[in-house]
Image (cartoon, rainbow, N blue to C red):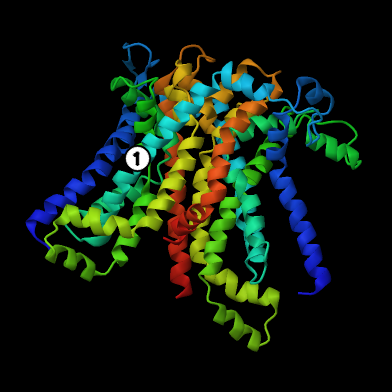
Amino acid sequence: MKNSKNVVWYWVFLFPTLSLFAMFQGWPIVASWYYSTLDWSGLTSDAKFVGMQNFIKVAQDPYFWNAFKNSFKFMAGTVPFHLIFALILAVLLHRPGLKAANLFRTFIFLPVVTTTSIVGIIMVFIWGSDGAVNGALMNMGLLDQPINWLGDANWAMFTVVLISVWKNLGVNLVYWLAGLQSISQELYEAAEVDGATGIRKFTHITVPLLIPIGTIILLLNVVNSLKAFDLVKTMTNGGPFFATDVVSTYIYRYAFTSEMGLPQLGYASAAGLFFALTIILLAIFQSFVQKRIKGGSK
Amino acid sequence: MGTIKRSIFYVVMTAFCLIWIYPFLWMVTASFKTQNEFFTNGLSLIPKHLTFDNITRAWNQANFEQYFFNSVIITVGTIAIVFFTTATCGYVLGRYSFKGKKIIYALLISSMFVPMEFAIIPIYDLIRKLGLVNTQMGVILAEAGGNHLIFILLFATFFAKIPNELEEASIVDGSGFFRTFIRVMLPLSKPVIGSVMIMQFIWSWNSFLLPLILTLSAPNARPLSVGLYALQGENIVDWTGIAAGGTIAIVPIIVIFLFLQRFFVDGIAGSVKG
């Protein structure tokens, strides 16, 4: 079957993917290095080469570091929920003979398929001063005065994290369920014969066998949470007083709006690259740790 | 599990699920309330006087008819391109070994770690140079050009498992490479095609950043997700109108999800199992 005619076909079949890849993933990576050295609004053709100046300006801007810190705060807030809470939920719903499991899963999954920008808009109301959350908390006597959850700088990040967990828990539930399904029931039966109880079965069988899939889930969540844009943009637009400003909203502000004077595509590119490098370093670090864990357990 | 323990479990899970779907119920019911009722009785989930005024207002006056049409065009266009490219690429990567295959895999995988949101500026510039800013075609191309490694892997692992005999039989029948792919392989991969299409449907319908940037100065090219956001910016007091717009935007996707969720959930699960 391996003849030269087929080799031509291979490349014909690969061509569409590779050309789109080159245009929309390869080129942007190359181009953003170039853009980051320009003083350029993007609107005119008077781009001026400024060397490393944009990077120096980014590194000196306290608002960039605020956004940088917030991106990691957001990650630290959401990721543990998606790892621990979603796993507990998956274990509860995975039990054989649980008739309503599919129904529960569907409900928890619904926010995942919903347009994030719409979620953002609804949540502005539900978590606002007159919204359902304050109504419920005040009825229960847990709150004397309404809090503007998204409009109060002390609470905004907390609220954004909670809403993001609500939005994405379902997809993590499915990830963990996929992992649980790959564990053979015989292992549990054997453990029961040996007298193992629920918790011991969980810590001695479930958890160790879920580590490979768990590291994938961790990586997906870390990368996705650092990229968060839609929810933050539509709920708080980075505010109030930059309390929820993350790197993606920071970049958007400089690249596509005139809030800061003319758009500054060069400067925004430098900020984007700076952050992209951070994420890549994290990914490398994680795969290094993962290899060490794997190596250690052999 | 004892009966009491089981009942407690069901009660807790049901309460939990109600919290999960409350925002949807709130939005859908708010879109059938009058402005007046909304401000006096905004939190209740049952409208006292059912009105369709909000829906018609959103559809006709707030341009949602156009946004809906744009969402459909963008979604269908993206699905068509993504299906075509990932099926062909996955087929070759999954079934054949050849020089350069490892490099292609490495390229595709490494780009997963590069957050494309931060390469948005060159993408915008490229679309502008192609003369496609403020068109649906620009959004389609940019969406289709994103990272679809998951789909490629789903196709590749599926095609890798198809026994060689089927391919050989097809060749004996006189089919070449392309005919074998179209006539034999693609029909076999229906479950993967279903997953890829429904996943891409949901992603395209919901995408926000790319269409937001690529239609910044062209309201008539916006999809629902962006149109609604713009409406909120202009008109924060018309909550029932905004709720109606949101309902128009999410009902199609939720209905499709409820009917085809098996494909979607299998696809998501398959993407982490690899």
Residue at coordinates 74% horizontally, 52% vertically from top-left? B16
Q: Quadrant of the N terminus of chain A?
A: bottom left
Tag 1's secondary structure? helix
* Residue A225 horizontal side relative to residue B184, left or right: right
Circle count? 1
Residue at 80% from the left image edge and 20% from the top image edge: B36
Q: Residues within 10 Å of mark 1 (few under 14, many from 20)?
A: some
Residue A168: % across, % down: 59, 47
| Depth order, front residue of B88/A186 | B88
Location of mark 1 (residue): B80
Relative image position of residue A250 (x, y in whole percent) = 53, 27
Report x, y in % for residue A220.
49, 50
Which residue reaches farthest left? A4
Residue B83 relative to residue B234: left or right? left
Name the amino acid type tagged 1.
Answer: Ala
Chain letter of disc 1 in the image? B
Quadrant for residue B4, please give it: bottom right
For residue A277, which quarter of the picture?
top left
Decide: is A197 above or below B266. Answer: below
Left or right: A154 as drawn, with respect to A80: right
